[in-house]
Amino acid sequence: MRDIERLFNEYAESHQNHTNKLIHQLAVPLIYFSVIGLVWAIPVPDWIAQYDINLAHLLVLPVLYYYFLLSGPIGAAMTLLTIACFLVIEQIALSAIPVWQVSVAVFVVMWVLQFIGHAIEGKRPSFLTDLKFLLIGPAWVWGGWLKRLNIGY
């Protein structure tokens, strides 16, 4: 069994309840977004900022590399999600509300929803067993969509 399939199967063990799965479909990508937003908001030295990049741009590189190691289609899907996150964050940055404030609010609300989902499920979140499942969650959501679209991963 490929590593991606083994990880998805392990992750799915604590995500069987329909309501919990629906909550995860919304909350997991938004938590991914909020983490990127929080890292994006960390000030960078001028020698980095002069290239119009920030820590979030640098952080996503090894993360996306990991996803591509797991699966090309998952890596591509996560790249699309990451680009969408950056586009939304850039729009928020143009508004009057600081990116970090939006990111914190989204992060807190979505984690509350996640824990409600797991309370309904009656099982602990996977990441409490192994932190790598914090990265597997967004990929698992995409894996479900890829399956529905008959795209193998």
Image (cartoon, rainbow, N blue to C red):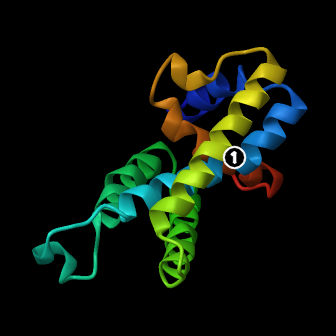
Instruction: Report helix, strand or loop for mark 1.
Output: helix
Name the residue: 37% across, 64% down. Answer: 41
Where residue 50 sits: x, y (%)? 18, 83
Query: Residue furthest toward the left?
Result: 47
Where residue 52 sits: x, y (%)? 27, 82
Q: Is residue 71 left or right of residue 22?
A: left
Where residue 90 sits: x, y (%)? 49, 79
Name the residue: 59% across, 23% down. Answer: 126
Taking depth in this image into account, of 36 and 63 the one nearest to the observer is 36
Name the residue: 54% across, 31% down. Answer: 2
How many marks are shown on the rendered structure? Answer: 1
Where residue 46 sits: x, y (%)? 13, 76
Q: Amino acid at mark 1?
A: Ala
User: Which residue has dot 1 on it?
Assistant: 27
The answer to whether residue 91 is seen in the rendering is yes
Tell me which corner region of the image, top left, top right, bottom left or bottom right, holds residue 24.
top right
Neighbours of disc 1 within 10 Å: few (<14), some (14-19), many (20+): many
Tell me which corner region of the image, top left, top right, bottom left or bottom right, holds residue 43.
bottom left
Q: Is residue 125 left or right of residue 58?
A: right
